[in-house]
């Protein structure tokens, strides 16, 4: 099982990042040009998530916004896998 990160490790990884901590997950929201762009972005995120076998919670709302939430559910919180996936997702945007 993946090792949970402690608060200091989480804070360090979030420093300078657009991701924010909400309890036992990190979250980020994007505003895209329209609905089609939002769905295209979600599809690119899905491809990376499948490749890594680590899947975010995804919310498309307001026709042009995408909110992603990352947490390692099996570990009960945040692990290095969440931050690695966040970095990969950041590279898509």
Image: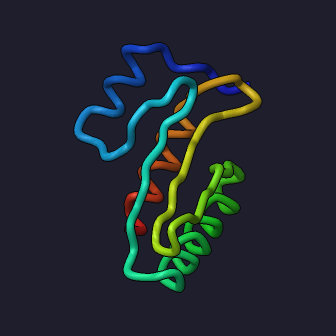
Q: Position of residue 40 (x, y in %)?
A: 55, 80
Q: Position of residue 78 (x, y in %)?
A: 56, 28
Q: In the rendered image, which quarter contains the N terminus?
A: top right
Name the quadrant containing residue 12.
Answer: top left
Residue found farthest to the bottom: 36
Q: In the rendered image, which quarter contains the C terminus?
A: bottom left
Name the quadrant containing residue 51.
Answer: bottom right
Q: How is the image coloured?
A: rainbow
Number of callouts in the render?
0
When the figure is inspected, residue 73 is found, relative to residue 34, above or below; the finding is above
Residue found farthest to the left: 16
Residue, x 55% and y 64% (percent of image)? 61
From the viewer's perspective, is 77 left or right of 75? left
From the viewer's perspective, is 72 left or right of 22? right
Residue, x 37% and y 14% (percent of image)? 8
Q: Position of residue 57 (x, y in %)?
A: 65, 50
Residue, x 48% and y 14% (percent of image)? 6
When the figure is inspected, residue 53 is found, relative to residue 62, above or below; the finding is above
Residue, x 61% and y 36% (percent of image)? 71
Q: Position of residue 9 (x, y in %)?
A: 40, 20
When the figure is inspected, residue 19 is found, relative to residue 47, above or below; the finding is above
Residue found farthest to the front: 62
When the figure is inspected, residue 56 is found, relative to residue 78, above or below; the finding is below
């Amino acid at each position: 099982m993946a090792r949970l990160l402690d608060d200091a490790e989480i804070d360090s990884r979030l420093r300078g990042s657009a991701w924010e901590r909400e309890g036992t997950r990190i979250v980020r929201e994007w505003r895209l040009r329209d609905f089609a762009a939002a769905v295209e972005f979600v599809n690119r995120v899905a491809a990376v998530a499948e490749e890594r076998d680590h899947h975010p919670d995804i919310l498309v709302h307001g026709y042009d916004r995408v909110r992603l939430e990352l947490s390692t559910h099996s570990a009960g919180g945040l692990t290095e896998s969440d931050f690695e996936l966040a970095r990969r997702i950041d590279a898509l945007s």
